[in-house]
Image: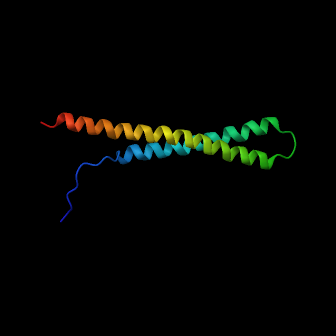
Amino acid sequence: MPIARGPSALPSVGARVLAFLAIVVAGICGALIGYAIVDVQCTKACATPEGISAVVGAVVGAGGVAVVAVLVLRAMSEWRTIKSKRDQP
């Protein structure tokens, strides 16, 4: 017999997947930008600075988009809660 559960504050699976994909894409873009900035400025063997800047760029890009994604998912949950309360008699 299935267990009855109350309403959930979790966003839909699709919204969570899209948020995750946005974070991954932002990390990749941040890594490319970080790498390119050092690549343009460096003239000799710069593998270490390029790698470090790629990692820093990826973390900053993914971190920024993660903050926005969490705020959006929370707002979606709040909107759903307000709508369900308004629809109740």
Q: Is residue 89 above or below residue 46?
A: above
Q: Is residue 66 left or right of residue 6?
A: right
Q: Residue furthest right?
A: 44
- Is 40 placed left or right of 73 in the picture? right
Residue 12 sits in which quadrant?
Answer: top left
Tell me which residue sits at (24%, 48%) in the image: 7
Between residues 14 and 62, which one lies in front from this camera angle?
62
Q: Where does residue 53 sit, x and y in percent of width and height?
A: 72, 43
Relative to 38, 10 lies left or right = left
How many tags in the picture? Answer: 0
Q: Does residue 57 sit above or below 5 in this rendering?
A: above
Rendered residue at 38%/40% (across/down):
74
Q: The C terminus is located in which quarter?
A: top left
At horizontal 73% and vertical 48% (from top left) the residue drawn is: 51
Percent across and percent down for residue 29 are 62, 39
Q: Which residue lies at the image location 20% right of the left edge and 57% below the top edge?
A: 4
- Residue 26: name its quadrant: top right
Check the picture and name the quadrant holding the N terminus.
Answer: bottom left
Q: Where is residue 27 drawn, in percent x and y?
A: 59, 44
